[in-house]
């Protein structure tokens, strides 16, 4: 969703709802933790994504990492921080 035409209260409600969904999917000690561990490796969460001489592979790895970081944002940031990051004022 976009921030266009959305009040801050609506954006906060939206981000709170999305955060809750991410927490249900990923923030549990069993399956969620295993999936996040696997995604961290696959998405190169803690390593360089640059592949010297291969721009296409580099961009693919950057895309993977960006998705992982978004998931982490929804697990780690407060709804208010999520509004600031994903629903900035127009």
Image (cartoon, grey):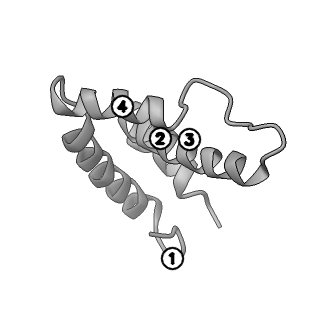
For residue 29, what is the image quadrant?
Answer: top left
In contact (CB < 8 Å): disc 1 and disc 2: no
- Residue 77 appears anywhere in the view: no
In contact (CB < 8 Å): disc 1 and disc 4: no
**Marks 2/3: CA–CA distance:** 5 Å
Q: Nearer the viewer, mark 1 or mark 4?
A: 4
Residue 9 screen position, x and y as percent:
39, 59
- When the figure is inspected, residue 88 is found, relative to residue 53, above or below; the finding is below
Q: Residue at x 19, y 42 (%)?
A: 24
Q: Residue at x 49, y 50 (%)?
A: 83
- Residue 72 appears anywhere in the view: yes
Left or right of 2: which side holds 27?
A: left
Residue 61 screen position, x and y as percent:
61, 44
**Marks 3/4: CA–CA distance:** 12 Å
For this orientation, the residue located farthest to the front is 53
Q: Which residue is identified by label 2?
A: 68
Toward the viewer: 71 or 3? 71
Marks 4 and 2, the one that precedes in the sequence: 4
Toward the viewer: 22 or 42? 42
**Marks 1/4: CA–CA distance:** 37 Å
Q: Which residue is identified by label 3?
A: 65
Left or right of 11: which side holds 69?
A: right
Residue 10 screen position, x and y as percent:
38, 63
Marks 3 and 1, the one that precedes in the sequence: 1
Q: Which residue is identified by label 4?
A: 38
**Marks 4/2: CA–CA distance:** 10 Å
Q: Disc 1 on helix, strand or loop? A: loop
Left or right of 83: which side holds 15?
A: left
- When the figure is inspected, residue 35 is found, relative to residue 61, above or below; the finding is above
Q: Disc 2 on helix, strand or loop? A: helix
Q: Nearer the viewer, mark 1 or mark 2?
A: 2
């Amino acid at each position: 969703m976009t921030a266009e035409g959305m009040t801050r209260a609506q954006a906060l409600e939206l981000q709170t709802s999305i955060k809750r969904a991410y927490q249900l999917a990923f923030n549990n000690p069993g399956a969620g933790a295993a999936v996040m561990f696997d995604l961290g490796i696959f998405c190169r969460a803690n390593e360089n994504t640059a592949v010297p001489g291969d721009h296409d592979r580099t961009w693919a790895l950057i895309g993977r990492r960006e998705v992982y970081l978004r998931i982490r944002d929804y697990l780690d940031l407060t709804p208010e921080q999520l509004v600031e990051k994903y629903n900035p004022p127009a």
